[in-house]
Image (cartoon, rainbow, N blue to C red):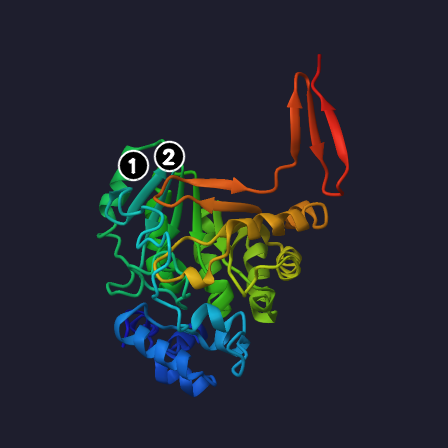
């Protein structure tokens, strides 16, 4: 039984629905084959992943959204190992964001002057096949104790320039409420930490986890921002939508970071449906991320120009509140940069010539 499964039992022996779902999560090639009509290549890939690669985990909720007969199902491709998985590609990196080189204390990564990333677990409810941290997640250890995170808290207290802490892992919302609250409480006790962000895919894959108990326990520590990870409009189903509405009703600002994935969401029509569905649930599309060059995942990455072309199609045709930034997190850990079409045609003294999304050329004059 895994650490997550052990955490599923309350003091009275009763099991909450979301914890029961974690117990029922598929974690093997045989489990996938029993639930889906796998191709031979998928089954072989799942066996290889189970034995020597990145672990498998698919919750019953996410499984219910997958087309069991279609290997090209956009949700299936995100969680079922494919035959290309593990094949080296040009530019692939084991640690694409240079997190190990920027670790300033155990489990604490600082790549920017004013913010840091706290890794509180190596477990997720679902393991996405394109995970940036596939080098470490699911590899053992489970949720980190407050004691283990002590050096990270000490570093943050000694560096008041760090005002924003992103709590990630693994997935912090896959932890027990009491353990998560103890970590957030320690962060909130550091006066210089102004904003805390919870990076999670749980609203997508385990929406039953967004309980009144969780929201009531976390609400005293506002401002707490929730950074979700919806990649396809089919993920915004009735249950996930209700979870998002519960978060918004409880005062949690919710932002979404979608990853641009080849054959899954790499077209303007799919992303338009996704972004509009999120806005209807009071979720702000925040980033559309150029996929990180994680080792063995090049079959899921798109050319950079694909994202730029999509953003040009969306600009002026999608409400500004539904339009995210296209972002590349530069390989090696050198920070995020925005990508997009170049609307500036020329610059002269006092005048800038631009083209609009409608293709009209306009001159903008600087003040004299």
Q: Secondary structure at mark 2?
A: loop
- The quadrant in which the N terminus is found is bottom left
Horizontal side, residue 160 vs residue 62: left or right? left
Q: Are marks 1 and 2 in contact (CB under 8 Å)?
A: yes
Q: Residue at x 64, y 50 (%)?
A: 322
Residue 12 lies in quadrant: bottom left
The spot of residue 256 in percent (x, y) is 53, 53
Outermost residue on the front side: it is 90
Horizontal side, residue 332 vs residue 326: left or right? left
Q: Residue at x 33, y 74 (%)?
A: 9
The spot of residue 217 in percent (x, y) is 43, 57
| Most foreground residue, 240 or 360 | 360
Relative vertical location of residue 332 with respect to residue 145 in this rendering, above or below:
above
Residue 357 lies in quadrant: top right
Outermost residue on the bottom side: it is 34
Q: Residues within 10 Å of mark 1 (few under 14, many from 20)?
A: some
The dot on residue 350 is: none
Query: Residues under labels 1 and 2: Cα distance?
Result: 7 Å
Horizontal side, residue 141 vs residue 41: left or right? left
Residue 101 showing in the rendered view:
yes
Q: Secondary structure at mark 1?
A: helix
The residue that label 2 is drawn on is: 192
The spot of residue 125 in percent (x, y) is 40, 68
Mark 1 or 2 closer to N-term? 1
| Most foreground residue, 226 or 111 | 111
| Most foreground residue, 360 or 182 | 360
The dot on residue 157 is: 1
| Most foreground residue, 65 or 21 | 65
The spot of residue 179 in percent (x, y) is 32, 59
- The quadrant in which the C terminus is found is top right
Relative vertical location of residue 142 with respect to residue 12 in this rendering, above or below:
above
Q: Residue at x 29, y 46 (%)?
A: 108
């Amino acid at each position: 039984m895994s650490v997550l499964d052990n955490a599923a039992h309350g003091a009275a022996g009763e099991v909450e629905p979301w914890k029961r779902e974690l117990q029922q999560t598929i974690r093997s090639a045989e489990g996938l084959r029993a639930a889906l009509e796998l191709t031979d290549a998928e089954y072989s890939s799942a066996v290889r992943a189970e034995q020597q690669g990145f672990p498998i985990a698919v919750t019953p909720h996410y499984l219910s959204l997958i087309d069991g007969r279609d290997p090209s199902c956009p949700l299936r491709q995100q969680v079922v190992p494919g035959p290309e998985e593990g094949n080296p590609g040009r530019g692939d990196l084991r640690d694409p964001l240079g997190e190990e080189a920027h670790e300033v204390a155990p489990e604490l990564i600082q790549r920017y002057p004013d913010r840091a990333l706290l890794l509180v677990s190596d477990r997720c409810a679902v393991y996405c096949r394109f995970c940036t941290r596939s080098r470490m997640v699911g590899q053992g250890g489970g949720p980190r104790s407050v004691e283990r995170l002590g050096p990270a808290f000490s570093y943050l207290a000694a560096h008041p320039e760090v005002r924003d802490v992103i709590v990630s892992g693994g997935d912090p919302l896959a932890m027990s409420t009491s353990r998560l609250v103890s970590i957030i409480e320690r962060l909130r006790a550091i006066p210089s930490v102004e904003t805390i962000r919870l990076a999670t895919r749980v609203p997508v894959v385990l929406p039953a986890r967004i309980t009144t108990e969780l929201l009531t326990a976390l609400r005293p520590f506002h401002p707490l921002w929730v950074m979700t990870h919806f990649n396809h409009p089919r993920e915004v189903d009735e249950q996930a939508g209700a979870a998002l509405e519960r978060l918004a009703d409880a005062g949690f600002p919710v932002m979404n970071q979608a990853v641009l994935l080849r054959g899954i969401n790499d077209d303007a029509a799919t992303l338009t449906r996704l972004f509009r569905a999120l806005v209807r649930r009071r979720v702000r599309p925040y980033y559309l991320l150029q996929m990180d060059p994680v080792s063995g995942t090049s079959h899921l990455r798109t050319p950079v120009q694909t994202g730029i072309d999509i953003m040009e199609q969306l600009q002026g045709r999608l409400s500004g509140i539904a339009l995210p930034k296209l972002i590349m997190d530069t390989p090696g850990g050198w920070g995020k940069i925005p990508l997009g079409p170049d609307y500036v045609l020329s610059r002269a003294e006092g005048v800038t010539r631009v083209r609009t999304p409608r293709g009209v050329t306009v001159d903008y004059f600087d003040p004299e």
